[in-house]
Each structure stands twice: as structure tokens, then as C-alpha cells.
């Protein structure tokens, strides 16, 4: 009983976030090595859809911590409720997705438990009776492997890094936290949704990024058109630091050190030379395409496929070709 | 208002990373160090907040080796009122760093504590939330817009597919994200003034790390890529490669 692998899953608008399924999948592999069952814990209010998805995620048990006080995410409120629920589970390890919520919440839980936490793990280990993980440092220019000296072991797991699986029909244990809404310190008063069809950069299957080669902010419509060509909900737009610093694009789209680190199945760099801090943010993408008119641009060193050419000539043709390929 | 900013000295973002002989740490020969870029937004926010209130004190603190004096002096030159070096040599994880910082911060009576959202060396993003938890005060992370009025903080942060507005009372920790402000740089007058500002060095009360780093390694080189062609005529070859070789279309 003292060795269950706990996943703290995440719901948004009642349904399960995809990275949570990937973490359950990683937890199943870890439990296979370390022993114990996989327990998926979900917090929130009105999360029936998420619970149903978790039951069929491959987890052995599901614990639903539900309260009106958890209707909106709050770091300290969720941490309090999670730590309370964890008291009844003998966890050897606690995993979360390295998402906006996981990044915010996991350190708060780790601090309350007085344990270490490996952020943004790309591999989980159980060797010589010790839990550990590998994670990128220096925005992916290097990796560290660390082991935990305190129990439970905690890690947040990088999205798009483990294959989600499905199966099983886990039982649900219902828990009502003692949390009082008035005790929450920092309250989310408003959530403003971005464009309805926009895909979060770090969860997108395809990232199309633009750099200074686009010459002007207005020309980013070429990038947006190519992203849209993959169909709704598939591709996100990214940007180099140079164009974000120039004010052409918002910082949330910046890929690289001091921006976001992404590893989608397909990354298309358009008019990006490939400064070291940009490469750090995208070099783990599964397939990298570079389009640049300078054949000596460093981006070609990490690209799987390159086209030497002007983005203004290549992108419209590529956009039509992608549309045709997606349609067929 | 009593404002404390926590800063860290890190390898500059344009550094090439080499592994030291121990196989578990950075070979810092030839590496330039700088203030963590996200911490610059914290310093700027502290100065702007003090200026808006028209009273108060900005203390900048760094937990780290003696070389961090340089980054602390730079913050004084930008306008911070005093600096504290919590001396600690060697590596520590986020657990130990947070415990050491919190044990100093708990006696500082700070209304507002600002830190970068993560350091660009370890890329953890844990310390702000951990310290707030240890001090039992509010914490808003990844702040890219903030207003502080009558002891209430209203902050905006990005989440996947949107933004959140978060409200909390002081005292609070805010972790700062790029876009929050435009950091100022030190001018000559500031540099001269900084020399006369209070600078304290204290040995940190050492806490052992909860994690042990087994290895630091460079990522595997990517396989040889190829140029499929030149100009728009190469698009067909690219589509074929994406379909048949990479199987991503």
C-alpha cells in the first residue's frame, strides 16, 4: 500500500486535458518498474466528463476531489485540497503534467510535503530502488538526471513526450475536501479565452514559427495561413525572440530560451536563422522543417528537411500543398 | 512599501553548454554570467511600484556564490536601495534554495516579494510558489501585467489558450514573466550612487538538497537532415518527405 504512483490530473471546462492522459501513461510504466497501482486524482467541480475519461485511461483507481470551492483553479486552494486527499493514499510518487496548472501547483504541493520536485521531466526512472527523472536544463541545451532522496518522489512531465493510452474501467472514489472557499488566498476572478480555434503552443501537433525573414508584422498572415492549412485544432503559430522583441508578435508565442520550449511532431521554421536560444526551444521536435533563403543559416543544422528559398515565394505554395495533402 | 526582489546569477542565454569533468555539473570556463533575464522584470517592477507609491524600500537579495555581488551591484545601480548576498557555494535544488531563502525572508517583513518566474539555468520555476507556501502568503506566477492598490494585487497571467486575472492581498509573491515591463539599465549616475548603498553579506543557513544530480549530459545530435530543394519548386519534394519518411502528414 505504500507505493502507489499518483497522477494529479487536470480538467479544463469539465473535460480532461490531454497531457494528463500522457502522464497516466508514464505512470503506468513507472508503476510497472516500481510496483504499486496508478491512482489518478482529479480536482474540480462539475468534472464528470473528465472522471469518465480517467476511468478509461489505464489508471487502476480514480479519486475525484469535488467542491464548489475548486470550480476555478487557485494555487493555494488546489494545493490544500490535494495534500488533504493525498493523506489517504500512500504515494511513492506524485506526477503532474508540466502545464500552466502543473507548473504552478506542483511546487506548492512539494513545499507542503517537504520534498524535491523534478520539473519538466522527459523520462522517469526507477533504478536501485530510487525514483528519478531526466529533465532539460538551459532550455534544452543539456539534460540532467536526478534522483530523489526524500519520499514521495515528485515530477511534472513534459507534454507531447509520452504516448497516451486507453483501457480499463477504474473505480471512482469520491472525496469532499474540507476546503472553505473563503480560505483561498489568491482568487481567479476572470478567465479570458483566446481565439476559439487557437491551439496551445505546447500542445499543438504542428508548430509553424516565423522569424525576421518575414520582414514585417503584417506578413505573419503567411504563417497563420500555413498553420490554418493543417485544419482546425492542429497547428499553433510560434515566433522567434527577434520578432517578439520587435513587437510583431505577443510573447506567449515566443519559442526558445525566455520563451516556450516545444516538441511537437512537426515544427516548421520560416525565415528563422536559428540563434542558439531558439534552437534550444525546439530541437526536440520530432520532425523539423526549415525554410530560409540563407543556405548557411544554423537552422538547417537541426532541420530534417530544408528548403532554401524566400519565405514569400515558398509559403503560399506550401500552404496550398498542405491543404491538398490534409484533404486527401 | 517594503519590497524584496530575489535574483539569481545564471549562465547567459547565448552560452554554449559544456559538461564538467565530474559529469554532473556545468563547465563554466569561458561562460559569461548575467542576471537571470526573468529577474530583470522583477527588479523593474519593484522600482516602478516604489515610484508609484512614492515611498518604501527595494531590497535585492541573491542566494549564491560571492560572484553574485556583480549582479547585485547592477541592481543597486538600477535603483534598488540595498542589497543582500546570502552566501552559499555549490549546487542546491529548488527545495533547498526555497528553504534557505524563506528562512531569511520570514524576518524581513516584506509587503511584496518579486522573483523571475524561473531561472534559465535549471528551468524549474518552483522557488516562488515554494517560498510563498513556506511563508504562508499569496503567490501569483508568470505575471505579465499587474496593478497594486490599497494592499490588493490584481495580476494577469497566460494559461493554455487564454489568460487569467488573479486577485490577492499583500503580502504576496509575484513571479514575473517577460512582457511585464521594459527593464531599465543602469546609468553612470546610478553606478556612482550604488557604491554608497548598503550591501550586506550573510552566510545562508545551509539546507541539504532533496534531489541528487546524477549526470549532466548534452542532447544527442540530431540525425543528418537534408535540403530537399530550392524555392517553391521544392514544395512537392517536402510534402513527399513529410508523408513518406517522417509520416507526419
Image (cartoon, coloured by chain):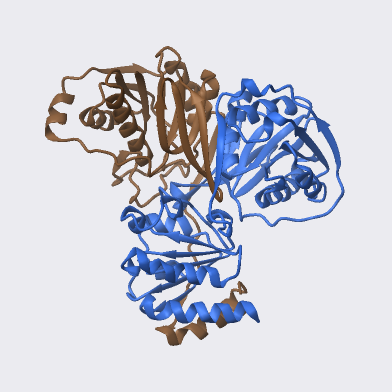
Chain drawn in blue: A
Whole-percent x and y of residue A220? 40, 66
> In which image quadrant can residue A34 be found?
top right
Say which of A228 and A24 sits in front. A228
Chain drawn in brown: B
Q: Is residue A262 left or right of residue A78?
A: left
Whole-percent x and y of residue A288? 50, 68
Q: Is residue B223 left or right of residue A52?
A: left
Q: Is residue B9 shown to the viewer in this render?
A: no
Q: Residue at x 61, y 66 (%)?
A: A232
Whole-percent x and y of residue A327? 64, 79
Q: Is residue B120 shown to the viewer in this render?
A: yes
Picture quarter with the C terminus of chain A: bottom right
Whole-percent x and y of residue A150? 63, 28
Q: Is residue A290 above or below residue B171?
A: below
Picture quarter with the N terminus of chain A: top right
> In which image quadrant can residue A297 be found?
bottom left
Q: Is residue A298 above or below residue B169?
A: below
> In which image quadrant can residue B177 be found?
top left
Q: Residue at x 31, y 56 (%)?
A: A246
Say which of B37 and A92 sits in front. B37
Amino acid at each position: 500500500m505504500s507505493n502507489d504512483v499518483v497522477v494529479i490530473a487536470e480538467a479544463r471546462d469539465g473535460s480532461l486535458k490531454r497531457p494528463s492522459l500522457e502522464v497516466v501513461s508514464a505512470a503506468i510504466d513507472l508503476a510497472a518498474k516500481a510496483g504499486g497501482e496508478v491512482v489518478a486524482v482529479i480536482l474540480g467541480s462539475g468534472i464528470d466528463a473528465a472522471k469518465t475519461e480517467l476511468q478509461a485511461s489505464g489508471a487502476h483507481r480514480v479519486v475525484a476531489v469535488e467542491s464548489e470551492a475548486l470550480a476555478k483553479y487557485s494555487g493555494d486552494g488546489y494545493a490544500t485540497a490535494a495534500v488533504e486527499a493525498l493523506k489517504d493514499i500512500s504515494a511513492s510518487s506524485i506526477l503532474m503534467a508540466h502545464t500552466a496548472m502543473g507548473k504552478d501547483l506542483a511546487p506548492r504541493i512539494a513545499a507542503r510535503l517537504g520534498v524535491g520536485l523534478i520539473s519538466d521531466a522527459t523520462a522517469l526512472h526507477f533504478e536501485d530502488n530510487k525514483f528519478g527523472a531526466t529533465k532539460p536544463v538551459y532550455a534544452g541545451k543539456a539534460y540532467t538526471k536526478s534522483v530523489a532522496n526524500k519520499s514521495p518522489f515528485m515530477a511534472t512531465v513534459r507534454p507531447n513526450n509520452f504516448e497516451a493510452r486507453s483501457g480499463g474501467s477504474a473505480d471512482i472514489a469520491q472525496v469532499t475536501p474540507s476546503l472553505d472557499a473563503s480560505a483561498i488566498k489568491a482568487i481567479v476572478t476572470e478567465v479570458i479565452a483566446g481565439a476559439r480555434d487557437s491551439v496551445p503552443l505546447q500542445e499543438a501537433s504542428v508548430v509553424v514559427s516565423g522569424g525576421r525573414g518575414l520582414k514585417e508584422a503584417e506578413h505573419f498572415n503567411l504563417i497563420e495561413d500555413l498553420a490554418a492549412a493543417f485544419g482546425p485544432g492542429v497547428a499553433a503559430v510560434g515566433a522567434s525572440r527577434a520578432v517578439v522583441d520587435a513587437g510583431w508578435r505577443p510573447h506567449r508565442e515566443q519559442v526558445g530560451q525566455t520563451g516556450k520550449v516545444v516538441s511537437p511532431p512537426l515544427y516548421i521554421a520560416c525565415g528563422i536563422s536559428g540563434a542558439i536560444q531558439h534552437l534550444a526551444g525546439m530541437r526536440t521536435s520530432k520532425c523539423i522543417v526549415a525554410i530560409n533563403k540563407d543556405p548557411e543559416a544554423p537552422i538547417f543544422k537541426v532541420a530534417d528537411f530544408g528548403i532554401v528559398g524566400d519565405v514569400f515565394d515558398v509559403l503560399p505554395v506550401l500552404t496550398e500543398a498542405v491543404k491538398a495533402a490534409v484533404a486527401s | 512599501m517594503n519590497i524584496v526582489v530575489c535574483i539569481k546569477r545564471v549562465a547567459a542565454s547565448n552560452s554554449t553548454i559544456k559538461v564538467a569533468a565530474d559529469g554532473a555539473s556545468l563547465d563554466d570556463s569561458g561562460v559569461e554570467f548575467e542576471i537571470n533575464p526573468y529577474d530583470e522584470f522583477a527588479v523593474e517592477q519593484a522600482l516602478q511600484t516604489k515610484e508609484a507609491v512614492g515611498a518604501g524600500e527595494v531590497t535585492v537579495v541573491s542566494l549564491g556564490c560571492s560572484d553574485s555581488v556583480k549582479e547585485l551591484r547592477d541592481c543597486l545601480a538600477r535603483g534598488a536601495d540595498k542589497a543582500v548576498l546570502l552566501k552559499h557555494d555549490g549546487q542546491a535544488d529548488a527545495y533547498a534554495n526555497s528553504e534557505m531563502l524563506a528562512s531569511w525572508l520570514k524576518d524581513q517583513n516584506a509587503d511584496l516579494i518579486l522573483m523571475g518566474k524561473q531561472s534559465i539555468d535549471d528551468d524549474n520555476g518552483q522557488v516562488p510558489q515554494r517560498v510563498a507556501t513556506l511563508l504562508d502568503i499569496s503567490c501569483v506566477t508568470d505575471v505579465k501585467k499587474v496593478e497594486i492598490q490599497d494592499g490588493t494585487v490584481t495580476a494577469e497571467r497566460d494559461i493554455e489558450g487564454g489568460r487569467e486575472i488573479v486577485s490577492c492581498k499583500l503580502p504576496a509573491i509575484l513571479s514575473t514573466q517577460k512582457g511585464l515591463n521594459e527593464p531599465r539599465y543602469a546609468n553612470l549616475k546610478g553606478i556612482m550612487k550604488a557604491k554608497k548603498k548598503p550591501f550586506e553579506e550573510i552566510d545562508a543557513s545551509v539546507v541539504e538538497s532533496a534531489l541528487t544530480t546524477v549526470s549532466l549530459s548534452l542532447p544527442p545530435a540530431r540525425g543528418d537532415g537534408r535540403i530537399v530543394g530550392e524555392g517553391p519548386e521544392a514544395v512537392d519534394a517536402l510534402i513527399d518527405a513529410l508523408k513518406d519518411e517522417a509520416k507526419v502528414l
